[in-house]
Amino acid sequence: MIRLAAPEDAGQLFGLNERFNGPSGTTVEDMARSLGENPRELVIVADCEGTLAGFVCVQVKYSFCYERPSAEITEVFVDEGYRRAGLGRKLLEFAERMAAERFGVSELTVLTGGDNFPAQGLYEAAGFEREDEAVFMKELP
C-alpha cells in the first residue's frame, strides 16, 4: 500500500534513511516531529503489511515570482529486497497526485547523480524529461 507517512513511521524511516543516505545526524524523534509538523514536505511510504519498503520525499516551494508553487522530489529509496517490483514508480505516481491535490503544484522536478542510471531509468519511465541544467552547491560554514 502506498500512503502518506505518519509520525509513528519514524523508527522504520530512520532505518531506511540510514541505508540510503548513511548517518544523517537526525534522530527518530526529530523525524517523528518533522512528519507531524512540516507542512511543506510530503513523505510517502510503501507499506508492505506493516514493513516500510521505501519512501519518497517531496519539498513544496513557494515564490513571489510565480503564481503556483513548485515541488522537488528530494529523496527516492526502495529497500533492496523490494526493488524491481514497481514500488518506485507507484511511489512517484502517488507523490505526483498528492503534490497536485494538496498544493496545486503543476511542476515536479527531481535531481539525481549523473551516473545513477537505475534512478534515471525510473524517472524517464515515470514520464520525467531530462533538462539541460547545471547544479551548483556551496557548503556554508
Image (cartoon, grey):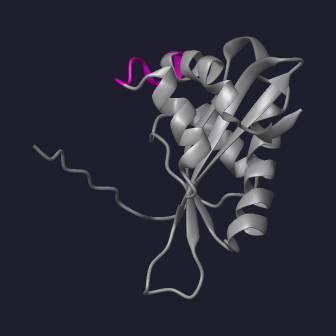
- Decide: is 4 above or below 1: below
Residue at 57% across / 70% down in the picture?
70
Q: Nearer the viewer, residue 109 or 16?
A: 16
- Decide: is 20 above or below 135: above
- Decide: is 114 above or below 132: above
In the shown orientation, is residue 52 left or right of residue 19?
Answer: right
Residue at 70% across / 61% down in the picture?
99
Residue 46, percent from left and from top: 79, 30
Residue 97, percent from left and from top: 80, 59
Residue at 81% across / 32% down in the picture?
87
Magenta range is 19-25
Q: Residue furthest top?
A: 81
Residue 43, percent from left and from top: 65, 42
Residue 39, percent from left and from top: 58, 57
Residue 21 in the magenta stretch? The answer is yes
**Position of the N terminus by quadrant:** top right
- Decide: is 88 above or below 13: below
Residue at 67% across / 18% down in the picture?
79
**Position of the C terminus by quadrant:** top left
Q: Residue furthest left?
A: 141
Residue 86 in the magenta stretch? The answer is no
Where residue 40 sits, quadrant-wise, is bottom right
In the shown orientation, is residue 10 left or right of residue 99?
Answer: left
Image label count: 0
